[in-house]
Image: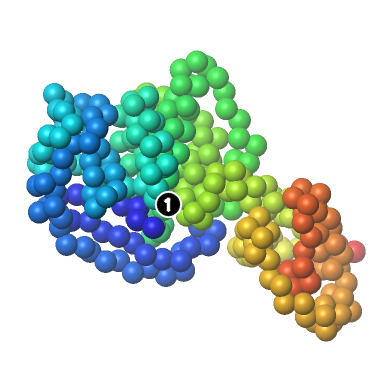
């Protein structure tokens, strides 16, 4: 999936395998400049004075640059000196929605989104799904509109997002500062959490609703775990921070129907016998998941979860 912005010197793509906002490995490859190709690009649609669309190898692209669309018409050759950014989407449907959004929102919001996305890609070392240019720009536009109308937005998962996705949340906080600098709108910490979840969603190549669902499942599991362990034990507090990583992966597998399926019954009997407190906690987590998403933990997932909980000291 390509999700990059071209500049006049060339373009850089980042490749990697991502789960839950944690980067596994990355290779950076600097591609040759496409300046020669740009000389022949023609305007397909004029979106506004600063944004036009064109065709590139049969795929429509969106091009931004100061005054690039001013007085321009379909078929005009694009002045490459005016090109600042090129945006590509994964499908014609996404591109259609993106262009429609750009017609209805201020170009300033796209610029803000681009800065946020650039920072996220650089600091997280991940390739974000190209749809984030559309979803984040739309979110920022709506957030600023709410602010102008004096409408408060409360994100019930703000604390959880801060705890579970600290890097994305930090970028979200920087985004809120940027929005204030550029627009004067002093958005709340809750908006930083929402922006962070947009980034998580783009990392996972999934919908925003899935990112929310994962976070809600993690919160529920962590609440059960906190109520089951000895909270006075200092080592348990450290272990809680470490286990979040595994719980996020579990929540993702549950939501995505990718649970571990190896039915190791012998191991299951072993953990039942040797880790009864952990198994009781697993039963509670299984009941919570069944109630919330209508799914049950597989035997392998239960075994895996018990192994991650075996070093906790449980309340007697």
Q: Position of residue 244 (x, y in %)?
A: 64, 60
Helix, strand or loop for disc 1: loop
The image quadrant that residue 134 belongs to is: top left
Q: Nearer the viewer, residue 58 or 95?
A: 58
Q: Position of residue 104 (x, y in %)?
A: 37, 24
Q: Position of residue 192 (x, y in %)?
A: 49, 38
Q: Position of residue 248 (x, y in %)?
A: 62, 59
Residue 138 falls left or right of residue 309: left
Residue 250 falls left or right of residue 127: right
Q: How many marks?
A: 1
Q: Residue at x 24, y 32 (%)?
A: 45
The image quadrant that residue 270 belongs to is: bottom right
Question: Extreme bottom residue here?
Answer: 266
On the question of residue 190 being in view, the answer is yes
Q: Residue at x 39, y 58 (%)?
A: 1
Q: Residue at x 15, y 40 (%)?
A: 42
The C terminus lies in which quarter of the figure? bottom right
Q: Residue at x 78, y 80 (%)?
A: 264
Residue of label 1: 129
Question: Extreme top residue here?
Answer: 149
Residue 224 falls left or right of residue 107: right
On the question of residue 307 being in view, the answer is no
Vertical position of residue 234 compared to residue 210: above or below: below
Vertical position of residue 70 compared to residue 208: above or below: above
């Amino acid at each position: 999936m390509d999700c990059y912005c071209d500049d006049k010197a060339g373009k850089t793509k980042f490749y990697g395998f991502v789960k839950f906002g944690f980067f596994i490995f990355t290779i950076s490859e600097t591609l040759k400049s496409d300046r020669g190709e740009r000389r022949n690009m023609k305007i397909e649609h004029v979106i506004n004075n600063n944004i036009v669309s064109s065709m590139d190898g049969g795929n429509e692209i969106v091009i931004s640059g100061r005054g690039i669309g001013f007085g321009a018409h379909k078929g005009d050759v694009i002045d490459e000196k005016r090109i600042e950014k090129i945006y590509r989407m994964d499908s014609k449907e996404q591109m259609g929605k993106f262009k429609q959004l750009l017609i209805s929102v201020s170009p300033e919001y796209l610029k803000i989104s681009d800065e946020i996305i650039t920072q996220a890609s650089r600091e997280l070392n991940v390739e974000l799904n190209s749809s984030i240019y559309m979803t984040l720009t739309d979110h920022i536009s709506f957030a600023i509109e709410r602010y102008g109308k004096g409408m408060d937005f409360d994100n019930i998962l703000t604390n959880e997002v801060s705890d579970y996705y600290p890097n994305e949340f930090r970028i979200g906080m920087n985004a809120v500062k940027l929005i204030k600098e550029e627009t004067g709108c002093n958005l709340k910490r809750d908006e930083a959490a929402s922006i962070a979840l947009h980034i998580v969603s783009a990392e996972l190549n999934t919908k925003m609703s899935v990112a929310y669902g994962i976070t809600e499942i993690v919160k529920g599991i962590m609440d059960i775990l906190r109520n089951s362990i000895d909270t006075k034990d200092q080592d348990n507090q450290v272990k809680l921070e470490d286990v979040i990583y595994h719980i996020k992966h579990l929540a993702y597998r549950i939501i995505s129907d990718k649970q571990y399926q190896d039915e190791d019954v012998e191991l299951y009997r072993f953990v039942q016998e040797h880790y009864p407190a952990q198994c009781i906690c697993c039963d509670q987590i299984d009941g919570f998941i069944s109630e919330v998403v209508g799914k049950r933990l597989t035997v392998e997932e239960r075994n895996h979860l018990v192994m991650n909980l075996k070093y906790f000291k449980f309340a007697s």
